Image (cartoon, grey):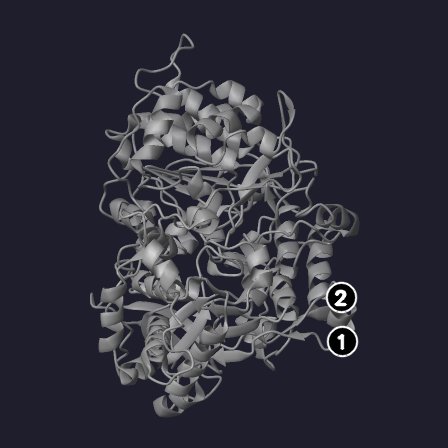
């Protein structure tokens, strides 16, 4: 039997602060995984679900996008993967009677943890204008309401179609086809808020916005730099790959403002040494860098390599740069080196908070390495200068030819299981003309070419009265986005908000004048359609595409798959009363595709490069790898046909005296906006979430004692008071002038207009705040 759902919000008065852990996983990780799994699913359902996750004939974990190796364990999941499965495969239910008992006004007072723990949504629900209760409706009625609202818009660009990274390739492809058939490119997605900066920088410099490494490259690497990433919490299965690399002789350098247990020592629960022994030490060096100082670090590394390349008498003089690679495959070296000559070591030290000796020592490791990988995540992508920062990461790798050879390359680690696949399928407001041309040819229509709204632009459009309908394909838009008060007010202006969801969340409660909840199948569940049980596909962080097939009985007989929801809606939008197709709409047999997903894959094969013979390729256990020019043949689809060195002016945050620079981050009992539990075990936090981690020296200078309750107030040039109240100060090891606190509670502090140059990503790792003690 599963445990009962919590009936109260988290009581922050019960919060306690204990010791910070220096080892990750081990027996505590196993125990916590089983505890949550049994509480949500019961022991028998838990065993059945967990033994199928990430297996070649099972379902892909709906957590992170870290890839699986060809040889897999029976228990091929991590602690947070087990939590993700438990959340979806839970025995708890949210039926129509729940909404009859609880008004929307009441549910708005519930916290994220309490809402999410109630269980799976079971039936389509409708919130009529002026009502305070959702009521059950048929699927025909629900989709009819949505279709009528979309048809009533004066312009298709008044509709916003959001996508979460959990969506399968098949559903994503049909979703973007439907949206473009309607006449808009308004396809914001969760990538806009996380790795958009990675895609922007990599597309410009190497011609493709994806990582260039495989798991084998990680295993073979001689040096791995891990910057702005906490794999112990966000991608725990990555620790197994790092452990293997370490055993093969790799040196690992961790670059992060906070010391993270997962990069110090990994106790692999699949081994005796991990369960009862001392585990494996991972990071050889820890560079505790200031927030936003990573561009300066990589410019410092480039400067050091340049100095050593030119230094008379150096044993490495003239041999550090891979001149053959540079001459044959790159352009722009001269301008880049000129930039390095002008940047000073004093400024690099100021920006990073590191010593010159630390940076030079890391540079020596680069010189010794014949194969280097750089991994990164949100710590590098959510700053104003993130794109320039990542260009400088690429610059350092290009100097030594660390693109397109074994054991080397760029490794942006994606945070959601198919966020990369969704982009490949066309979930992007600015797809290239080549994609539109192929889509138009396959479906005999003319897709719109003007660029649509990304996430920030979509919020601005809703705020400014330029949008009328919002449809969310998964996710929790209102809690994932910045400037919470602005976002909530913007959604309230709409005529209709509709959410395709598995679980209850705040986005069902912050609505337009009317709202729909469209409950969908989860990844763990059997998807039975007219032609039989279906499988879907996903793409991981390393461009591997493979099948996923759920086996569990659906949480309700009244759920539809994401594919079925899109197809039924498209039929209402595009089909005429006599069964024909509306003029200008894509020519597609939506009913047939809903009944047989292989038909969708045949269309994908005709439109998306690399998916030729799609159906046959996924018959192979483990799937297939998409082509990647820089990795496969050192070919670069940039305008010049070469990889680009870039000269980037050094930027870093300047924080006024008496203020701190805040990064928002996850707790260990959290995945994106989903709160699994009340603890952050590795950081010593128990039974609460409203904490802010601050350096003791900063607290001393402010005259604020450890444990004091404060309001966090962000400061931005618009002068708006953005406040997150009642946080407990925790003295912690973080660079002076830097602080950290959990999102989504702190998203209210991130100004909507504070975004990365080029990519438009919200700057959630660079928020200037002050601490105001609570009276």
Q: Count the labels in the image.
A: 2
Q: 260 or 643, which lies in front?
A: 643
**First in sequence: mark 1 vs mark 2:** 2
> Is residue 154 something that shows in the picture?
yes
Residue 174, percent from left and from top: 45, 30
The quadrant of the image that shows the C terminus is bottom left
Question: Residue at label 1?
Answer: 277
- Classify mark 1: residues with Cα within 10 Å, few (<14), some (14-19) or many (20+): few
- Classify mark 2: residues with Cα within 10 Å, few (<14), some (14-19) or many (20+): few
Residue 131 falls in which quadrant of the image?
top left
In the rendered image, the residue lying farthest to the top is 578
* Residue found at x 20% / y 68%: 717
Q: 618 or 173, which lies in front?
A: 618
In the rendered image, the residue lying farthest to the left is 718
Residue 278, percent from left and from top: 72, 78
Question: Residue at label 2?
Answer: 271
Residue 187 falls in which quadrant of the image?
top left
Q: 473 or 92, which lies in front?
A: 473
- Please give left or right for residue 494 compared with residue 397 in the image: left
Residue 21 falls in which quadrant of the image?
bottom right
The dot on residue 767 is none
- Please give left or right for residue 200 compared with residue 169 in the image: left
Residue 297, percent from left and from top: 37, 75
Answer whether labels 1 and 2 touch (C-beta < 8 Å). Answer: yes
Q: Secondary structure at mark 2?
A: loop
Query: In the image, is residue 722 above or below residue 404?
Result: below
Query: In the image, is residue 254 above or below residue 385?
Result: below
Q: Secondary structure at mark 1?
A: loop
Q: 352 or 509, which lies in front?
A: 352
* Residue found at x 45% / y 42%: 422
> Is residue 124 something that shows in the picture?
no
């Amino acid at each position: 039997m599963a445990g009962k759902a919590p009936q109260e919000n988290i009581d922050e008065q019960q919060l306690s602060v204990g010791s910070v852990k220096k080892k990750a996983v081990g027996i505590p990780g196993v125990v916590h995984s089983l505890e949550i799994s049994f509480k949500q699913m019961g022991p028998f359902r838990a065993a059945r679900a967990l033994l199928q996750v990430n297996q070649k004939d099972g379902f892909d974990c709906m957590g992170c996008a870290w890839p699986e190796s060809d040889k897999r364990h029976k228990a091929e999941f991590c602690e947070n993967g087990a939590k993700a499965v438990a959340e979806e495969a839970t025995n708890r239910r949210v039926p129509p009677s729940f909404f009859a008992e609880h008004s929307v006004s009441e549910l708005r007072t519930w916290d994220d943890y309490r809402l999410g723990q109630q269980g799976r949504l079971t039936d389509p629900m409708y919130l009529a204008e002026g009502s305070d209760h959702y009521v059950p409706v048929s699927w025909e009625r629900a989709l009819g309401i949505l279709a009528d609202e979309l048809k009533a818009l004066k312009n298709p660009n008044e509709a916003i179609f959001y996508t979460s990274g959990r969506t399968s390739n098949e559903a994503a492809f049909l979703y973007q086809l439907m949206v473009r058939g309607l006449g808009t490119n308004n396809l914001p997605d969760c990538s806009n808020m996380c790795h958009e900066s990675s895609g922007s920088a990599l597309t410009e410099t190497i011609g493709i916005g994806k990582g260039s490494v495989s798991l084998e490259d990680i295993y073979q690497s001689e040096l791995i730099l891990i910057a702005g990433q906490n794999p112990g919490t966000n991608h725990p299965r990555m620790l197994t790959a790092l452990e293997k690399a370490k055993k093969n002789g790799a040196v690992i350098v961790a670059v992060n403002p906070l010391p993270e247990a997962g990069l110090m020592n990994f106790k692999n629960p699949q081994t005796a040494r991990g369960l009862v022994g001392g585990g494996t030490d991972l990071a050889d060096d820890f560079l505790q860098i200031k927030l936003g100082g990573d561009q300066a670090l990589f410019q410092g590394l480039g400067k050091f390599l340049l100095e050593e390349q030119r230094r008379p008498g150096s044993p490495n003089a003239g041999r550090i740069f891979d001149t053959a690679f540079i001459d044959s495959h790159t352009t722009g070296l001269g301008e880049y080196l000129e930039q390095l000559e002008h940047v000073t070591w004093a400024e690099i030290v100021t920006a990073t908070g590191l010593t010159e000796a630390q940076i030079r020592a890391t540079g020596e490791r680069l010189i010794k390495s014949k194969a280097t990988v750089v991994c990164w995540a949100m710590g590098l992508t959510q700053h104003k200068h993130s794109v320039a920062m990542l260009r400088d990461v690429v610059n350092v790798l290009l100097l030594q030819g660390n693109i397109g050879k074994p054991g080397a390359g760029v490794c942006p680690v994606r945070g959601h299981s198919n966020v990369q696949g969704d982009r490949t399928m066309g979930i992007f407001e600015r797809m290239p003309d080549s994609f539109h041309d192929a889509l138009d040819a396959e479906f005999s229509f003319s897709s719109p070419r003007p660029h649509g709204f990304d996430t920030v632009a979509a919020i601005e459009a809703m705020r400014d009265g330029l949008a009328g309908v919002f449809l969310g394909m998964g996710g929790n838009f209102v809690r994932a986005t910045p400037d919470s008060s602005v976002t909530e007010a913007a959604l309230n202006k709409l005529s209709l908000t509709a959410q395709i969801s598995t679980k209850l969340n705040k986005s069902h409660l912050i609505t337009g004048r009317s709202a729909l909840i469209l409950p969908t199948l989860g990844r763990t569940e059997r998807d039975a359609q007219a032609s039989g049980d279906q499988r879907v596909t996903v793409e991981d962080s390393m461009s591997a595409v493979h099948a996923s097939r759920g086996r569990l009985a659906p949480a309700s007989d009244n759920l539809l798959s994401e594919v079925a929801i899109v197809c039924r809606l498209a039929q209402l939008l595009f089909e005429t009363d006599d069964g024909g197709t509306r003029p200008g709409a894509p020519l597609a047999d939506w009913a047939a595709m809903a009944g047989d997903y292989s038909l969708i894959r045949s269309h994908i094969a005709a439109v998306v490069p690399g998916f030729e013979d799609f159906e046959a390729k996924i018959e192979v256990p483990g799937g297939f790898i998409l082509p990647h020019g820089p990795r496969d043949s050192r070919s670069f689809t940039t305008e010049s046909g070469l990889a680009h060195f870039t000269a980037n002016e050094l930027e870093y945050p300047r924080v006024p005296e008496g203020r701190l620079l805040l990064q928002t981050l996850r707790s260990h009992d959290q995945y994106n906006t989903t709160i699994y539990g009340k603890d952050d075990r590795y950081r010593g936090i128990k039974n609460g979430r409203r904490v802010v981690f601050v350096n003791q020296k900063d607290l001393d200078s402010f005259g604020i004692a450890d444990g004091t309750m404060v309001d966090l107030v962000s400061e931005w040039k618009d002068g708006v008071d953005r406040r997150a109240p009642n946080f407990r100060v925790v003295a912690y090891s973080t660079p002076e002038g830097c602080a950290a606190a959990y999102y989504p509670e702190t998203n209210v502090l991130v100004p909507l207009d504070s975004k990365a140059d080029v990519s438009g990503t919200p700057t959630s790792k660079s928020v200037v705040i002050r601490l105001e003690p609570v009276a």
